[in-house]
Image (cartoon, helix red, strand yellow):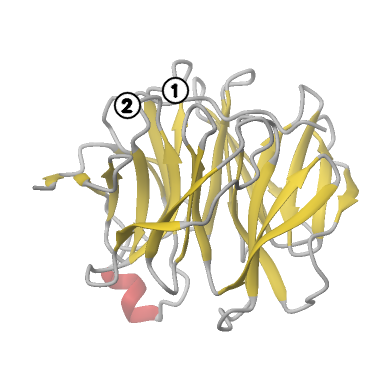
Amino acid sequence: MTETHSFNGRILCDVASELGEGPTYDPATDKALWFDIKGKKLHELHLSTMTKVVHDLPFLGSVLAVIDAERQLIVSDQGLFIRATADGKLTPFTTLEDKAHNRSNDGRVHPSGSLWVGTMGREEEKRSGAIYHVARDKVTRLYSDITVPNGICFSPDGNIGYFTDTGVNHLMRVALDPATGLPVGQPEVLSDETANAGGIDGSVCDADGLIWNARWGGNAVEVYKPDGTKIARHLVPASQATCPAFIGSKADRMLVTSAWAGFDAARRLADPHAGQTFELGIAVKGRFEPKFLL
């Protein structure tokens, strides 16, 4: 039976992002970073001082990966860019596809240093997107006909990948080559969520292999065992939770982004914390994100 836990955390950032997404944490700088995709913003929060900086972006950014102390990789609707941390200068790196109406969405670095990232139509056009594997500057399309790519995360040993098309709402599992992050088998359904409220959104996998998934439309972060058994549901004070991230010097805390995208004025009044960024307020056994291998 799935245990439901009340929200005992806090608001980390009260800025209401239209589409808060893609959170990550850099232990070298003690900074949590996340995007407002539709607002074209990169948020940067220094956790120990709670100092906040917001960077304007010239594109719809959705995924950030650390390369080294001086550089980050940002994935956007305009392709992949290397960002200099010193001054924010953006240098084109590579592109994913040639569909001008698409944008990037969910993504995560595999333990091998390669990247998985998904694309989708700007208006969620059916089956417009795909999921790609990026190893240095080599781009490989893994899965096509995706409506909303989400849930991308990996087992600690890199042997298993997880993902979803939120439009289908099946949490998928696939065997991977741990040295490359490329699939070595066919995806299989780990959990069919079509009968449950809300959609599978962003996910992270902890040190024990548990999958933590933000539930879009479900006011929660839900936890699955590697066999697909759902064991916990942690409520958050916004209906459209989008993605979790492990934060803190021990990766033992959890940040959760959210969104007000699609809301009219009345819906925003009824969901006053929509778009804010939260700390879940529980101890977790997290992992730091791998660096992207350039």
Q: Earlier in the sequence, mark 2 or mark 1?
A: 1
In front of the other: 50 or 113 = 113
Q: Amino acid at mark 2?
A: Val
Q: Dividing the picture into quarters, in which one does residue 60 lie?
A: bottom right
Above/below status of 272 relative to 268: above
Question: In the shown orientation, is residue 232 left or right of residue 89?
Answer: left
Residue at image location 60% in from the left, 51% down from the top: 35
Specify whether residue 289 is in view.
yes
Specify whether residue 56 is in view.
no
Residue at image location 55% in from the left, 83% down from the top: 126
Around disc 2, counting alpha carbons within 10 Å, would you say few (fewer than 14), some (14 to 19), or many (20 or more)?
some
Question: In the shown orientation, is residue 42 left or right of residue 224?
Answer: right
Q: Are marks 2 and 1 in contact (CB under 8 Å)?
A: yes
Q: Position of residue 76 (x, y in %)?
A: 73, 58
Q: Amino acid at mark 1?
A: Ala
Q: Position of residue 215 (x, y in %)?
A: 33, 58
Q: Position of residue 155 (x, y in %)?
A: 46, 34
In front of the other: 268 or 124 = 124
Question: Which numbered circle lies on residue 251?
Answer: 1
- Viewport quadrant of the C terminus: top right
Q: Dividing the picture into quarters, in which one does residue 72 lie?
A: top right
Residue ranking furthest to the left:
1
Pointer 2 residue = 284
Above/below status of 92 relative to 177: below
Provide the secondary structure element on which disc 1 rests. Answer: loop
Residue ranking furthest to the front:
185
